Image: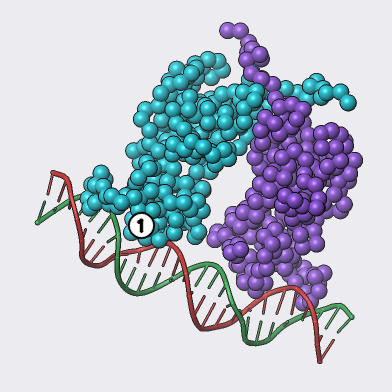
Chain colours: A purple, B cyan, C green, D red
Amino acid sequence: MSPYDPSAFPPFAVTVDLVVLTVRRHALCALVVRRGEQPFQGRWALPGGFVRADEDLSAAAARELAEETGLCAHDPASPGVDNGAHLEQLATYGDPRRDPRMRVVSVAHLVLAPDLPAPRAGGDANSARWAPVDELLEGPGQTVEGLAFDHARILTDGVERARSKIEYSSLATAFCPPEFTVGELRRVYEAVWGVALDPRNFHRKVTGTPGFLVPAGGTTTRQGGRPAQLFRAGGATLLNPPMLRPEV
Amino acid sequence: MSPYDPSAFPPFAVTVDLVVLTVRRHALCALVVRRGEQPFQGRWALPGGFVRADEDLSAAAARELAEETGLCAHDPASPGVDNGAHLEQLATYGDPRRDPRMRVVSVAHLVLAPDLPAPRAGGDANSARWAPVDELLEGPGQTVEGLAFDHARILTDGVERARSKIEYSSLATAFCPPEFTVGELRRVYEAVWGVALDPRNFHRKVTGTPGFLVPAGGTTTRQGGRPAQLFRAGGATLLNPPMLRPEV
DNA sequence: GCAAAAGTGTTACCGCTACACCCATGC
DNA sequence: GCATGGGTGTAGCGGTAACACTTTTGC
């Protein structure tokens, strides 16, 4: 039997795109970079890049993340370093016309990170910033230009994934620093869902769910008012029963 | 500006693999085909194939599905024909060593279908069959040989997706014929989750959820006993509150 | 009649919501 | 003192679990 004939299949470029979300100033924000070349030159886009010939998809995503933010992601699929951020595969986008230059299939990944210092511009992107997702996704006829390629769609899917996953998992803690208060965690939920939650019931719910939070020992008054207990994320990953997202 | 330089990125083969699930004889079953060539010649594998040069990913999945089963999938992303089956993207698998011949990135899709006549063998697969997923996924040291490539992992992910999605969506109806009884729908849940449900409470729950089921008019005694009302799937896609999966 | 499956009624319990209320700090 | 956020108590309500019980068919 002869070796495989590469002419039997069409060649594709494969990239990873990153939806990197954080909570800043009570708003859900995404990392975007300004494109330095055609097409969509000068427009904002999600960070990303080509997958290397011998590189796994999640490794490519983690590499791009480190290049763009210096962040070390914790990938559940390939455990090792864990600097706080959560990384998971989101979905794959392969419309034949999504990139005018050639056939590109992009495997989008979702990253949830605590609030970071200003992003450092990396590689071929000549600038990078955190932008509120509401601003990036304003409807058609908006004041700002939309994101490049199909990145508005990818960002929408990533935000929806984050919104639903914090309902039934402990992922909201990925938006928090290593030690945080119940109030800070509540403000994460409020920013991601865009709703107000009852502080009293929220407190009972999260402290009463076994394994969600473990006391870190100290207290802080960095939010003002009475000193609040500091917590760390507990071992539990699934919340049962889930956090209930109020009706819209 | 010169056109894009294709030497700047490594070429990949892109395939779609299908996790086609159905419920037969009270068991969750998946469609598998016997491989006719190396590698893994003679072993069972998930159906799939190369994405064509100008073809969208979901179109490739629908085409492979039609070739293997004659089924016309309803793809929410590209509405049109709707022969009952549900199709959605599952996840993408791109480990550099997942195919010994070359670098292949596979975009797996999940299909939920009603019980079908015996599958017709299609294309290069010299036979196809429905196999209970419990049998396909028996642990290491099992009596049967495992699936080819990383298909056991893909199947596991697809089954887990199906199990969780029927909790909070009306997708379980995709396993049923166009008209079905409450008892038949309950047996779908029981087969997918591998648990027994209380028929009385199940009946109240599904008939009491607005938009989940609409009466089709007739009755049937095909399950024996007292005649049961026939229903069709209603317009609702999300179940709120969800069906509760009993603790294991 | 008997078995089998479809439906309805009822009660106890659990978790959530919506509050009232108290606590500990900075100013 | 006063504002601010942290934390506890409690009553009402909606949904589920775990039954008992009736209905309508095939054999």
In the rendered structure, the answer to whether residue A149 lies left or right of residue B143 reads: right
Q: Residue at x 66, y 68 (%)?
A: A197
Residue A55 can be seen, yes or no: no
Q: Is residue A137 above or below residue B89?
A: below
Measuring from the top left, give residue A19's x and y in whole percent. 73, 45
Q: Quadrant of the N terminus of chain A?
A: top right
Q: Is residue B225 above or below residue B2?
A: below
Q: Residue at x 38, y 33 (%)?
A: B116
* Element at label 1: helix
In the rendered structure, the answer to whether residue A119 lies left or right of residue B158 reads: right
Measuring from the top left, give residue A158's x and y in whole percent. 68, 47
Residue B207 can be seen, yes or no: yes
Measuring from the top left, give residue A133's x and y in whole percent. 75, 53
Give the class, few, some or many, for how many residues have Cα within 10 Å of label 1's Cα (few <14, many ≥20). some
Q: Residue at x 33, y 59 (%)?
A: B200
Going by the numbered disc 1, the residue's amino acid type is His
Q: Is residue B227 above or below residue B8?
A: below
Q: In the displayed image of the protein, which residue is found farthest to the front?
A: A141
Q: How many badges with numbers are in the image?
A: 1
Q: Which residue is mark 1?
A: B203
Measuring from the top left, give residue D24's x and y in whole percent. 19, 55
Q: Residue at x 35, y 53 (%)?
A: B215
Chain of the residue that carries numbered disc 1 in the rendered image: B
Q: Quadrant of the C terminus of chain A?
A: bottom right
